[in-house]
Image (cartoon, rainbow, N blue to C red):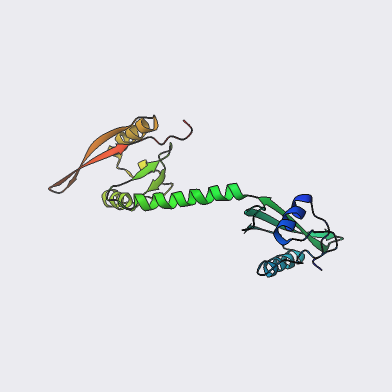
Amino acid sequence: NMELFTANRPMIEDFKVAFDRELKPGVSVLENVPEPVYSDWLARYQRVLKGESFDMIDQFLIGGVPEYVKLSYKPLYEDSKIIGGSCHSRDITRQYLAEQENKNNALHLNAQINNTNESIWSVDREYRILTTNNVFRDNFEQIFGHRLEKGDRVLDFIPKDLRQEWKNRYDKVLGGKRFVVTDKFEFGEFLQFTDVAFNPIVVNN
């Protein structure tokens, strides 16, 4: 019947701020809840009362209550029969906003590194690809015949006669050194000279 069994103090306080009504056992948890929240919550309660357990993230643009909350819904059983639903909410505003900022930063970085004619790539301590731009993937495929993807061990796709030289370079930058080398590529009678800049990625020293 959508009636409240029980609620803790934070839920009662947040509900009062959001909907100007104090929750008490026996009253409807949907009373004074406006649309479209009413229909959305009703559908969720109906899901849990049918035996479904699930999690969701809600955003509230209401002063005085958490902006982003993670909600967990689980059915309550008695003698193998569903008698109600348990609902738990947790404030994840700081975590959610930080994750969104990281996603936006990643999108901005991806746009920047792909808006250049220079090859850009990074590797971890196992020589696995972390990031690449399209120019690097295209050039590497043209020269070495393999289109690198994230997680590929870059040394595995370099010819054996060049592998030790490149390993030494990666080991040097992974040791904290910044340096530039000039490579020569021969395409028939055409020579191409390329400067390659190596820079360590430092996080928390």
Q: Residue at x 75, y 50 (%)?
A: 10
Q: In the drawing, does residue 82 fall left or right of residue 94?
A: right
Res 127 quadrant in image: top left
Pinpoint residue 60: horizontal percent, then vertical percent. Answer: 63, 58
Q: Residue at x 79, y 51 (%)?
A: 8
Q: In the drawing, does residue 104 fall left or right of residue 78?
A: left
Q: Residue at x 40, y 41 (%)?
A: 123
Exactly how many numbered labels are in the figure? 0
Residue 46 position (above or below residue 94): below
Pinpoint residue 173: horizontal percent, then vertical percent. Answer: 36, 33
Q: Residue at x 63, y 49 (%)?
A: 92
Q: Residue furthest right?
A: 79
Q: Nearer the viewer, residue 184 or 179?
A: 179
Quadrant into which the N terminus falls: bottom right
Residue 34 position (above or below residue 183): below
Res 83 quadrant in image: bottom right
Q: Nearer the viewer, residue 21 or 67?
A: 21
Pinpoint residue 177: horizontal percent, then vertical percent. Answer: 35, 29
Res 18 quadrant in image: bottom right
Q: Nearer the viewer, residue 176 or 110?
A: 110
